[in-house]
Image (cartoon, rainbow, N blue to C red):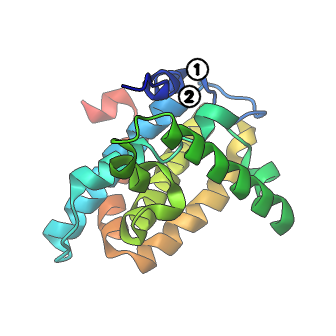
Amino acid sequence: MKKSSFLAWILRMNLIKRWSPMHLVKEEDVAEHSHQVAVIAHLLATVRNVYCGGDINPERAATVALYHEVSETKLQDINHATKYSTPALTAEFKKIEDMAELECLDSLPVKLQPLFKELLVQKDVDAEYKKLVKAADVIAAYFKACDELKFHNPEFISVKKRLGDKVEAYKIEMEEVKIFMDMFEEGCLANIDDLS
């Protein structure tokens, strides 16, 4: 049986810092972010099923979210302003991410690879799940930006606006996002005394 380095790479996600090269009040790593996106994706899928007549598997959504940043185990986090600075640069970064995802997939034993391909290789993820996880990813990043601003970090002023605009667009496009934000945003932005 083939020895696999797959889990070793996944377990290093907590060593990969997000938001570089920005100043942070509270550091965030890829493992923490992936966990938050998984929880939000699970909730979004559940809200879709309960309130919007959807039929999507919340556990599948959470699992896709857990692995959505797998390329960063090889590449680190690439700042949004750099990655999306020009269409040509974005295309090149996407190619490199595709290669990193395939490398992660290839690190698994051959018998497991077909079961993980639609989780690890983003272009092979089912479109419905990919869209829901992307919305969850944006929501998690939006909450992070709001949190940094709460502690007076001006680095996140434009980030919050950009992500807030994306959240608003998702609210129009996906009813479950609007319901989710109405249901959970206020609590996520509250301080501990207000939650109590």
At a point 52% along the width and 40% down the height, the residue shown is: 106
Q: Secondary structure at mark 2?
A: loop
Q: Depth check: 161 or 44 in front? A: 44
The type of residue carrying mark 2 is Asp
Quarter containing the C terminus: top left
* 33 up-or-down from 119: above or below: above
- Would residue 8 appear left or right of 155 to someone viewing this image? left
What's the mark number on residue 15? 1
The reply to whether residue 40 is visible in this rendering is no
Q: Is residue 195 above or below residue 99?
A: above
Q: Quadrant of the N terminus?
A: top left
Instruction: Please determine whether, in this image, residue 143 is positioned above or below residue 133.
Output: above
State left or right for residue 5 relative to residue 64.
Answer: right
| Image quadrant in which you'd find residue 46 | bottom left
Residue under label 2, please give it.
Answer: 29
> Horizontal and vertical percent for residue 57?
21, 60
Q: Is residue 97 left or right of residue 167?
A: right
Quick one: 192 or 77, which is closer to the camera?
A: 77
Q: Position of residue 52 (x, y in %)?
A: 21, 76
Measured in 3D between alpha carbons, the distance from the residue under mark 2 to the one under mark 1, in whole angstroms, is: 7 Å
Q: For the point 43% across and 61% down, which residue is it?
A: 125
Position of residue 145 measured from the top left corner of the image (x, y, whole percent): 59, 44
